[in-house]
Image: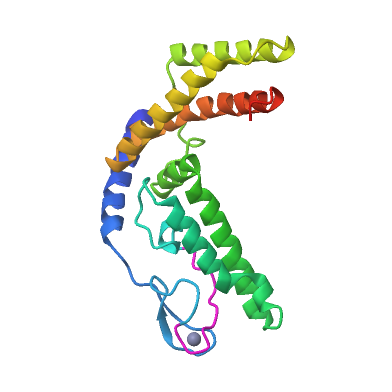
Amino acid sequence: MFARLLQNRLRSGLLTSRLSLNTNTPLIEQCWQCQRQVDRSECQTHCPCEKHIILPVRSELDYFRLFDFSRSFEIDTKQLTRIFRNKMKFLHPDLFTNKSDTEKQHSQDQSSLLNEAYKTLLSPLARAHYLLKLENITLEESPVQLEPDFLMRIMEINEDLVEIISKNEPFPMELTIKMRQEIDDHMKQLSTALNQMDLTKAQEILARLQYFNNINDKLIDLEVKHGII
Ligand SMILES: [Zn+2]
């Protein structure tokens, strides 16, 4: 029963996403200062009037829209950083210290939203989670059942790591190389699954990646401890 519900949800998610990719619904509102009609899907932060008044946050605009990207796992992160810095030049609360309380508030809200969006899109894992969230799928609400063999392997690696750390054993180079290769492979698979809108598959890969990432964090700590990085 639950499986069928999830299937339907995934199927409908798939349909909405294909539609939303091609639809650029206007979001018309009146500028709070000059009263002109503004399409917020075009003017995300400021009114196009001559005073360039800062506008309130619109939650309908997803993080990709904030950076003028289409919803996709593959993004140009250099361009993301460039756009982020450019936009921040006009949103940062320091620029609004002599402005009205309304403008101060909008600047606070806009810059914290942009910061959050930037952080999310910059990290491939957070970006993948966000893409799934836009399709109403979260790993918390619809957990993935991974096969026992995989979970057993992860458990063994974690046990090995505990031993390496507690007994001060040499750095596990072979494991590190293998783990990073697996992360790379899974990232490629994740990208393909998301491009093909195979959300069930993407969800499963993401669940595995979380385990690998967790191990990789421990390996990074060990690299620091052993003076490797
Ligand atoms: Zn205006």
Image quarter for residue 4?
top left
Question: In the rendered view, would you say 143 is above or below 172?
Answer: below
The location of residue 83, given as percent across then percent down, is 47, 63
Determine whether 206 is above or below 16 in the image: above
Is 56 a magenta residue? Answer: yes
Confirm whether the magenta stretch covers residue 9.
Answer: no
The x and y percentages for residue 138 are 47, 40
Could you tell me residue 48's position as x and y percent? 44, 83
Q: Considering the whole magenta stretch, tell me its main secondary structure.
A: loop
Residue 16 percent location from the top left of the image: 30, 51
Q: Indicate the quadrant containing the N terminus: top left, top right, bottom left or bottom right.
A: top left
The residue located at (54%, 83%) in the rendering is: 53
Residue segment shown in magenta = 48-59
* Nearest to the observer: residue 119 or residue 19: 119
Q: Foreground: 3 or 143?
A: 143
Task: Determine whether 37 is above or below 8 in the image.
Answer: below
Q: How is the image coloured?
A: rainbow
Count of labels in the image: 0
Q: Give the residue furthest to the front.
A: 228
Is residue 70 visible to the viewer in this orientation of the structure?
A: yes
Whether residue 1 is visible: no
Question: At x 43% / y 75%, what residue is drawn?
Answer: 43
Q: Is residue 166 left or right of residue 15?
A: right
Q: Quadrant of residue 54?
A: bottom right
Image quadrant where one finds the C terminus: top right
